[in-house]
Amino acid sequence: MRLLIVEDEKRLALSLARGLTAEGLAVDVVHNGLEGLHRASQGSYDLVVLDIMLPGMNGYRVCDALRTAGHDVPILMLTAKDGEYDEAEGLDTGADDYLTKPFSYVVLLARIRALLRRRGSAGGSPVIAAGGLRVDTAARRVQLDGDEISLTAKEFSVLEQLALRVGEIVGKGEILEHVWDFAYDGDPNIVEVYISTLRRKLGAGRIVTVRGAGYRLEGR
């Protein structure tokens, strides 16, 4: 999953980015509202963490502009304000959740996971079943025929992209967009390396290569 953090407190933004990256998420960071709006409008993000007090354009206006343009990416607003009218204004402009500073990182992570789970499963179960494979996107756990499979954070993120569209073809570029951050400029064949590792751990026939198109997680 790929996140955008729009936060002008650089120390906070980088601290959040490090923590979320360690959770296996791809994270991009910008520090002003105008750049945040541009990046959120152009990028393929699964969630935006958006501060309200930003230079260039405040978070309310960024959120409203995204919703007016038809972007439905989940938005978690951050603010130093704690008044109920500020929270109401954030939600009224289209934010999906609201968190007041200072906040617990554990709570922030739980809110982010809840929003991602809601987006990925449309309110359904966070557990995706594909044959004997069970992918729990909330707990970030994988079981194969009842046995726990140990995956690194990045391996899980690649598998998650396939599991969210089980039975469908997912392009290499789509996986790169959601699992690696904007600054990644390495070899795009890194996706093949992780697919190979997942096949070794889950069974060779579970992930199929569709030449010229991408990969498909078999659902039977």
Image (spheres, rainbow, N blue to C red):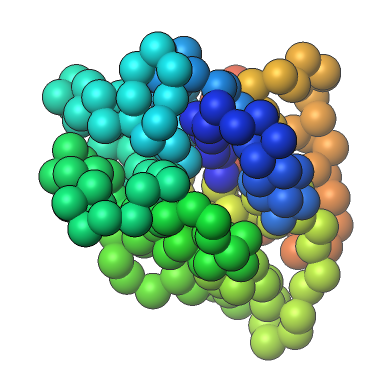
Q: In which quarter of the image is the N terminus?
A: top right
The residue lying furthest to the bottom in this view is 146
Q: Nearer the viewer, residue 173 or 96?
A: 96
Drawn side of residue 79 relative to residue 139, left or right:
left
Write the residue at 53% across / 67% down: 107
Q: Can residue 210 be seen by looking at this rendering?
A: no
The x and y percentages for residue 155 are 75, 52
Q: Which of 81 and 89 is in front in this view?
A: 81
Quarter-of-image position of residue 137: bottom right
The x and y percentages for residue 68 are 15, 24
Q: Which of 217 and 117 is in front in this view?
A: 117
Q: Which of 15 and 191 is in front in this view?
A: 15
Q: Across the whole image, how many numbered discs are drawn on residues?
A: 0
Drawn side of residue 189 relative to residue 168, left or right:
right
Write the residue at 67% across / 71% down: 142
Quarter-of-image position of residue 181: top right
Write the residue at 18% across / 44% down: 89
Q: Note whether 215 is above or below 188 in the view shown.
A: below
The x and y percentages for residue 205 are 70, 56
Write the residue at 69% across / 76% down: 144
Q: Note whether 45 is above or below 153 in the view shown.
A: above
Q: Can residue 125 be seen by looking at this rendering?
A: yes
Quarter-of-image position of residue 192: top right
